[in-house]
Image (tube, rainbow, N blue to C red):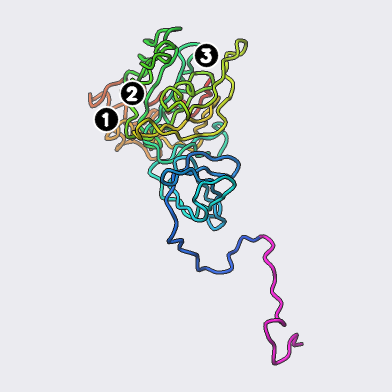
Amino acid sequence: MRRYGKHTDEDDIRSRPNPKGNRPRTSIRPKHEDAAEGFVLTVDRGRLTCLVEDRKVTAMKARELGRKAAVVGDRVWIVGDLSGKKDTLARIVRIEERRSVLRRTADDDDPFERVVVANADQLAIVTALADPEPRPRMIDRCLVAAYDAGLEPLLVLTKSDLAAPDKLLETYSTLGLGYVVTNREELENGDAADRVRERLGGRITAFVGHSGVGKTTLVNALVAADRRRATGHVNAVTGRGRHTTTSALALPLPDGDGWVIDTPGVRSFGLHHIEPSRVILAFPDLVPGTEECPRACSHDEPDCALDRWVAEGHAEPARLDSLRRLLATRERREGD
């Protein structure tokens, strides 16, 4: 039976609504040729603060981006009100391809990856030598994440006035890590900031560490006074710090010579997403020795060809030990 007559117009045709709203009405998408380039400084409940030229612009993700989310460090393209005035809102319509991505999972059993920062060049791993006590397993995990992301790691040891750094530095001596040792007096007089700043010039550096290790205090010493963030203290009973930094924030170094990204203090750094084949790339002296390894070799099993490679004198045994210690962190909890 015909529902409509021979001569119908558009008013006679019923269209079904799309209740989910997840299918665009057309495949022709806007080009946004007038979009301006921006740099994501921080993200807070769906609102992103972006630097556009010399202005801070509040923006939200355009619906056309779907599930793709922008994170701190992203280069994005923005349309709409770019004045930066109060109560204005722009839209992020494109996200540039990322040069690097630092990821973590909540724990080793969690398959959901969380992007910490994008486009960083360096990862500063901040660890206190005392109050709270250093946790080498946490350092190892951060190193694995840095190597996987292609970031250069930098070890920053704080509170050397409370404990000596020698033993901890010896643990990582075979990795050839850059490091800086600081104490409270040097933070107060500016010497510590000057030494750390020398290693940050011209780079985007993400700072990670446990709560209470002095990470945000150090970041505050590196940036201008009007950019500083609130800091907390270490609980005398638990030995743990209190979370005062709740979201990642990119801050410029003086004279525009690089960026630091202060991230929230973490109590775990899951490595569920890490593949051993990517971690070993940080050990170029060992990579050739993997050519004879069994397929899907974990590099820590009886048939691993790296044992023979090292025995033949192609690399130092300590280097292989360091690689296997880092790979083993994926199977251990940080407190073990």
Q: Residue at x 45, y 19 (%)?
A: 127
The label shown at residue 254 is: none
Q: CA distance from mark 2 to mark 3?
A: 22 Å
SS assignment at label 3: loop
- The front one of 161 and 281 is 161
- In the image: residue 122, left or right of residue 111: left
Q: Residue at x 43, y 53 (%)?
A: 36
Tell me which label, 2 or 3, sits earlier in the chain.
3
Identify residue type, mark 3.
Answer: Pro
Identify residue type, mark 1.
Answer: Asp
Q: Residue at x 45, y 51 (%)?
A: 95
Q: Residue 200 at x, y = what percent?
A: 34, 29
Whether residues under marks 2 and 3 lie with C-beta atoms below 8 angstroms apart, the answer is no
Q: Which residue is mark 3?
A: 132
Q: Residue at x 48, y 21 (%)?
A: 217
Q: Residues within 10 Å of mark 3 (few under 14, many from 20)?
A: many
Tell me which label, 1 or 2, sits earlier in the chain.
2
Q: Residues within 10 Å of mark 2 (few under 14, many from 20)?
A: some
- The front one of 6 and 38 is 38
- In the image: residue 217, left or right of residue 13: left
Q: Which residues are magenta?
A: 1-20
Is residue 99 located in the magenta-colored stretch of the structure? no
- Badge nearest the viewer, 1 or 2: 2
Whether residues under marks 1 and 2 lie with C-beta atoms below 8 angstroms apart, the answer is no
Identify residue type, mark 2.
Answer: Leu
Quadrant into which the N terminus falls: bottom right
Whether residues under marks 1 and 3 lie with C-beta atoms below 8 angstroms apart, the answer is no
Q: CA distance from mark 1 to mark 3?
A: 35 Å
Q: Residue 117 at x, y = what percent?
A: 46, 38
Q: Which residue is mark 2?
A: 177
Q: Quadrant of residue 14?
A: bottom right
